[in-house]
Image (cartoon, helix red, strand yellow):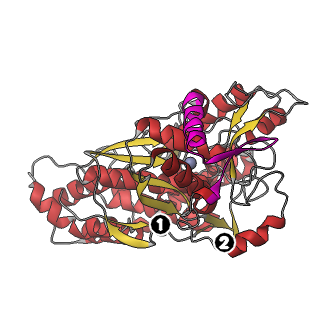
Amino acid sequence: MKHDFYLFNTAGRVKELFRAAHNEVGMYCCGPTVYNYAHIGNLRTYIFEDVLKRTLQALGYKVRHVVNITDVGHLTSDEDSGDDKMEKGAIREGKSVWDIAAFYTKRFQDDLKALNITDPTRWPKATAHIDQMISMISDLERKGFTYRTNDGIYFDTTRFPSYCDFAGLDPETLRAGERVEMGEKRAVTDFALWKFSPSDKKRQMEWESPWGVGFPGWHIECSAMSAEYLPLPIDIHCGGADHIRVHHTNEIAQSEAASGKKFVNYWVHGEFLVIDKGKMAKSGENFVTLEVLKKKGFSALSYRMFCYTAHYRNPLSFSWDSLSAAENALVNLRKAVPQQDSSEHVENDVIETILTPFFNAVCDDLNMPRAMAALWDILKNGSLSLMQKRVAAERADTILGLDLTQRAADAYTYSSDDEKRIVVYSLRELDTGVCDGIFEKVRLRRAARANKDFAGADRLRNELVNLGLTVKDLPDGTTEITFSS
Ligand SMILES: [Zn+2]
């Protein structure tokens, strides 16, 4: 499909026409530090990155997509101080660091699967690329960009004059920050490339290096792993907006100093998910995971749908009510997609014309709220045939990833989470208002059962029966609802 694709580039702060530098578009996305579950704010970033990748693919690009796994040495602060998140996680759970890494890597990948986020081409692990990191640090050392302190090898940011440009940092403000604890660091912006293991305690993860036993800094991981799998300049580098000021600024400094080449053409950053006026965080009440959502009876894909209610560059405010509204909207959207009817042939260029407003929105810096409205317009358009609508929805869903056509021919299947499904038979005989109530009640009943509130579950079952429905819980976890008249 031929379409101009515009992306907002953080470098330069302007929307730009996307032009690929390579036959296969290189896309690098900063991955998780695997010491805990991902919260749904983290997952919002991976959803927008997936939409970006699917859009490139729908436009005919081949994409080489790399997401790293940070399984070593990520400190609790960006400033090279604080505890090591991985070692801390291991102590918290009484497991080895390696077990912690394997466990949370798997959980993270399961979350992505549940959200219909397609696998990257590669999942490099930091611990499998220590040699590449050491080699890049050695390059930087040879070129005079490093110095040694009592606790590690540091990048000398004064040797990289454009250091402040990317994030628009103000050197004056930074100097004011120098009052904070710096150790032997020469400038507040300098950062660790290699940290020495402390002499008084044995770390679980540490390696030999030309500078002594220790472990890599967080930022060098991404520079080394992206260089290993993607040619420079990388077409697109993504991440959360919180990475702009330190992590991505440092990646640029290291990668460009080591290679002498431009690091990245397009920097694309997603905004935060906010909850109760604060940023979602890894601790406290603001820590909501996909598991928590499922326990409350929501499907993973209703969260994906919820993410489309805001542009990825705007903060999105999370509440259970708005998630519930998104779930209802998803149910209604699936209902609006007509059933398969193979008797009518639909020409490809007709579908492309029908989908033009949808693609105009997606290709305008991934404007998903507008794209969803465009899809609704198509499904409500009385002058289109059922088959045209169906094929258009299928095509749109290659980008949306919402399983829009998942219902079977004579039953409506509503996926509530991975294994358990709600099947409603003969849904078309029900009027819409009743349907919405049914899904809500089934969801609440499921949540009640999960919370062992059996009285509440029975009450909801009775309400469903009073609507003229039979409710059957199948051994595989499916809830089967049949309209009995
Ligand atoms: Zn990174």
Q: CA distance from mark 1 to mark 2?
A: 19 Å
Q: Is mark 2 within 8 Å of ligand 1?
A: no
Question: Taking the image as drawn, is residue 480 in sight?
Answer: no
Residue for badge 1: 10
Residue beneath the point at 83% across and 63% down: 180
Q: Residue at position x 47%, y 41% from top?
A: 226
Q: Residue furthest right?
A: 200
Using residue 95 as the reference point, say whether residue 393 is left or right of it.
Answer: left
Residue type of the residue flagged with mark 1: Thr
Region in magenta: 130-158
Q: Where does residue 363 sit, x and y in percent of width and height?
A: 31, 65
73 is higher (above) or lower (below) than 97: below
Number of residues whose C-alpha sits closer than 10 Å to that of mark 2, classed few (under 14), some (14–19) or many (20 or more): few
Q: Would residue 25 be seen by someone viewing this image from the given angle?
A: yes
Can you tell which quarter of the image residue 168 is in?
Answer: bottom right
Q: Front-most of 8 and 472?
A: 8
Instruction: Residue 241: give its label.
Output: none
Q: Earlier in the sequence, mark 1 or mark 2?
A: 1
93 and 63: which is toward the camera: 63
Left or right: residue 272 compared with residue 72: left
- Front label number (1 vs 2): 2
- In x, y percent, where is residue 175? 74, 70
Q: Are marks 1 and 2 in contact (CB under 8 Å)?
A: no
Q: Which residue is mark 2?
A: 171
- Per the image, label 1 sits on a secondary structure element best described as loop
463 magenta-colored: no
| Residue placed most toward the observer, 301 or 50 | 50
Residue positioned 68% across, 35% down in the render: 72
Most foreground residue, 75 or 227: 227
Say which amino acid is labelled 2: Pro
